[in-house]
Amino acid sequence: MDGTQSAAGALAAVGCNCAFSCGKRPPPEDAGIALCGGGPELHGAHLIAEIRGLEDRKSALAARQARLSVAFDLIQRREQRELGMPAAELGAGVAAQIALARRESPARGGRLLGLAKALVTEMPHSLAALESGQLNEWRATLLVRETAGLSAEERAVVDEELAADTGTFDGAGDRKIIAAARAAAYRRDPRSVTQRASHAQTERHVSLRPAPDTMCYLTALLPVAAGVAVYASLTRQADTLRAAGDPRTRGQLMADTLVERTTGTPGGISGIEIQLVMTDRTLFQGDSEPARLPGYGIIPAGWSRGMLTNAGKDAAGAGTAGRGTKGTVTGAGAGVTAGDKGMNVWLRRLYTAPGTGELTAMDSRARLFPAGLRRFLTARDDTCRTPYCDAPIRHFDHIIPWHHDGPTTQGNGAGLCEACNHTKETPGWSSRPRPGPRHSLGVTTPTGHTYGSTAPPLPGATVRESEPDLAAAKSPSSRRQRRQRAKDLLCTRRQGKFAA
């Protein structure tokens, strides 16, 4: 299929939604020529106009979400106050509920709620610009972020100074908006800007995120003096090695020096366990089923085998999980000397049930999860089990609380990040295990909304929709809801045509 045919197919799929509401849908062979009988310039202009109109509506809907978020926060705080919660704890769990409703992580939900409060209560001009489409949600976020150190009164003055009718946002990109907001904030309160710079040093941290092709980004947020010193040191070492005839590039030398100085081992990692999860077929039979590296994600089968066979050069202390057919879990490891440096590779065998890929059970009578069971839950859950949250696991939680006779088992255990574990303890929140081919649980919020979470499939597992989910999708109530959504969508389209 050539480019013209592809474009024609795409236009035919869109159909006619022009300002004249002619209701025509041209045949696929004519779709590239006209949508409603006009020439290419006519229908092209209409498509661009509709794209712009949809962008304006997205901004208006973002403003509406901000108003609803603030109203929901006020309602929740009032209800929590009536329940006798301490003043310092009012608002707990509100951001998490907004995040679930918007299919975002809890951390993102907190930022969205903060944005909503700033726009609705302190920055009415920016909110009006968002509602009218002169700002999008991201650029409104930039304005709120750059004025975060100001008092409510000073932020309102800056908001008025940067009002849309002053022309500040006409054709402005992100950098121009940031510069205008910073300049206005500094003029109003230069001391707060200086204090923000001092406070920023307390937020220094190191983070890790995946990159394509089994690479990753190791990022450090540092004070500028420390960051420049680290970079200069790595640069000097790389230049010295290059001058001595090292064939590696300058960037490779800087990266290798960073790893060596951090781990204390030339060119590799020593004394740190890496839980490499893979099937026995991938390890011993050359199968192509990908493996999983917790903290990173899916990695190719060949690369994971090479990581083990070249442990003396690339990695050490890697663990594997093999797929078996028996309902037992063993924590036994076999020490294998690999590589030219004599490093040990430990294989930890974690067996899964046939077909479903569900790790088999471990049990404990203790209230706290023992070390073996914690490793088991980490291998199964990979990241925080709260829906839409990809944060690293920091706490091991009883789904049904211990004080409600919840057992310390893998079925009643879930890995959570610290924030989500604290949110779960807020009044009105509850969790329950769910049936399914893999470990599943349901999270219920104080408003009665329930969200599902299923453990990610392990290597070699067959991903199938669970029978309870299929039954729910076929239920009469679910069909009624789908029909009602279709009617609402049709009504909205008709109203848009009449308005045009």
Image: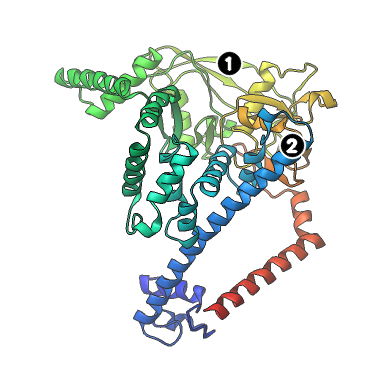
Give the SS element for disc 1.
Answer: strand
Circle 2 residues within 10 Å: few <14, some 14–19, many ≥20: some
* Kind of residue indicated by mark 2: Gln
- As drawn, the label of residue 334 is 1
Give the SS element for disc 2.
Answer: helix
Disc tally is 2
Asked if one can make out residue 445 in the rendered structure from this viewpoint, the answer is no
* Kind of residue indicated by mark 1: Ala
**Color scheme of the displayed model:** rainbow
Q: Where is residue 491 in the image (x, y as percent from the top left)?
A: 65, 74
Which of the two discs, 2 and 1, labels the residue nearer the N terminus? 2
Say above or below: 409 vs 449. Answer: above
Say above or below: 293 vs 173. Answer: above
Q: Residue furthest right?
A: 405
Looking at the rendered image, the disc whose residue lies closer to the viewer, 2 or 1, is: 2
Whether residue 499 sits left or right of residue 395 in the image: it is: left
Q: Position of residue 49 (x, y in %)?
A: 42, 72
- As drawn, the label of residue 80 is 2
Whether residue 462 sits left or right of residue 60 in the image: it is: right
Q: In which quarter of the image is residue 226?
A: top left
**Pointer 2 and pointer 1: residues touching (CB < 8 Å)?**
no
Q: Where is residue 4 in the image (x, y as percent from the top left)?
A: 37, 74
Q: For the residues marked 2 and 1, what is the alpha-carbon distance in whole angstroms?
A: 54 Å
